[in-house]
Image: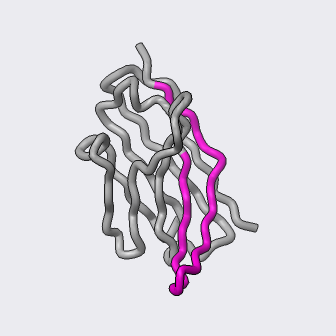
Amino acid sequence: QVQLMESGGGLVQPGGSLRLSCASSGIAFNHFQMNWFRQGPKKQRELVASINKDDSTDYVDFVEGRFTVSRDNAKNTVYLQMNSLKPEDTAVYYCQAVRDYGRNVYERHWGQGTQVTVSS
């Protein structure tokens, strides 16, 4: 059974930091691209950061320079270090695992999400 379990969310003041973790089980973790998404109040779910199998990373503009995604294949875990947090970063953060088998065949899994609230 595949499981992605996020943790590390909470309430933080503007300018503060949080480190999210997403521990996986039931998948060949090192074969998956890992993504972090978020969904703010009354907003669509949006991609925040990605880390590929080769450890290359991509970020959306609004988190570039503030967030860092990393992975530990030995622990089957992906992390999202979030610094200089802003109220607009308030959202439920989700991790996603994606494996590309080629020929437009993908395997995707989602975690249940962890709430991040940035407020004074």
Horizontal and vertical percent for residue 90? 46, 29
Residue at x 54%, y 68% (from the top left corner): 98
**Residue 113 among those drawn in magenta:** yes
Q: Is residue 28 above or below residue 89?
A: below
The x and y percentages for residue 67 are: 32, 45
- Quarter-wise, where is residue 69 in the image? bottom left
> Residue at the spot x=55%, y=29% of the render?
42
- Residue at (63% x, 62% y) in the render: 109
Q: Was residue 30 drawn as part of the magenta stretch in this picture? A: no
Residue in view at x 40 percent, y 69 percent: 52
Residue 36 visible from this viewpoint: yes
Pick the front one: 46 or 115: 46
Q: Is residue 99 left or right of residue 12?
A: right
Q: Which residues are magenta?
A: 94-117
Q: Is residue 8 visible?
A: no
Residue reaching furthest to the bottom? 103
In the displayed structure, 82 sits above or below 110; it is: above
| Residue 19, picture quadrant | top left
Q: Position of residue 118 (x, y in %)?
A: 43, 24
